[in-house]
Image: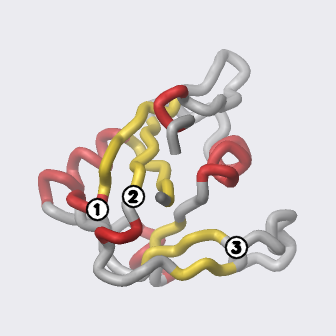
């Protein structure tokens, strides 16, 4: 299971359209994802304080091609030694097994949603 954070409205538009193709796919050639252990650091590092986010839980076996686990593009990123899952191609909604709200607290920090603890 891999995970991707997106605004709920953007995800709902993608479901209606039949595929999710964010700007990163057009600009970088892939969709950024995280493992469960990387999720909170990514959320708090890149999305801190943002409202209206969801986590889409992606079953890797349902993807058209397996994700590639790669280092972040910026070598200066403190997580550069970690490998992150990248999806090369649009994400079909049927590869998503669950969509979970990702709410931040009053300080803007994200905590692990209870629904994701099963993964």
Circle 1 residue: 95
Contact flag, marks 2 and 3 (Cβ < 8 Å): no
Give the residue displayed 66% in from the left and 38% down from the top.
48
Q: Is residue 94 left or right of residue 107?
A: left
Q: Residue at x 48, y 55 (%)?
A: 4
Q: Position of residue 15 (x, y in %)?
A: 19, 53
Number of marks in the rendered image: 3
Within-10-Å neighbours for mark 3: few <14, some 14–19, many 20+: some
**x 60%, y 26%: residue:** 104
Comparing 21 with 97, the one in front is: 97
Label 2 belongs to which residue?
A: 58
User: Does residue 48 appear to the left or right of 50 in the view shown?
Assistant: right
**Up-down relation of residue 93 to residue 39 (above or below):** below
- Which residue is at 23% across, 58% downward? 93
Residue contact at pointers 2 and 1, CB within 8 angstroms:
yes
Q: Work out whether mark 1 precedes mark 3 in sequence or the reverse, and give the earlier one.
A: 3
How busy is the neighbourhood of tag 2: few (under 14 within 10 Å), some, or many (20 plus)? many
Circle nearer the N terminus (2, 3): 2
**Disc 3: which residue:** 83
**Looking at the picture, how far across and down is residue 1, in whole percent?**
47, 58
Question: Residue 70, position in %: x, y?
Answer: 65, 80
Vertical side of 99 occupied by 84: above or below: below
């Amino acid at each position: 299971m891999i995970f991707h954070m997106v605004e709920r409205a953007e995800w709902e538009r993608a479901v209606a359209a039949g595929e999710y193709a964010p700007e990163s796919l057009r600009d970088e050639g892939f969709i950024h994802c995280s493992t469960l252990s990387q999720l909170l650091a990514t959320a708090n590092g890149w999305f801190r304080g943002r409202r209206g986010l969801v986590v889409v839980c992606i079953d890797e076996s349902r993807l058209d091609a397996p994700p590639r686990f790669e280092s972040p593009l910026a070598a200066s990123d403190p997580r550069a030694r970690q490998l992150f899952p990248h999806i090369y191609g649009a994400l079909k909604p049927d590869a998503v097994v669950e969509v979970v709200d990702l709410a931040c607290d009053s300080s803007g920090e994200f905590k692990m949603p209870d629904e994701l603890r099963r993964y």
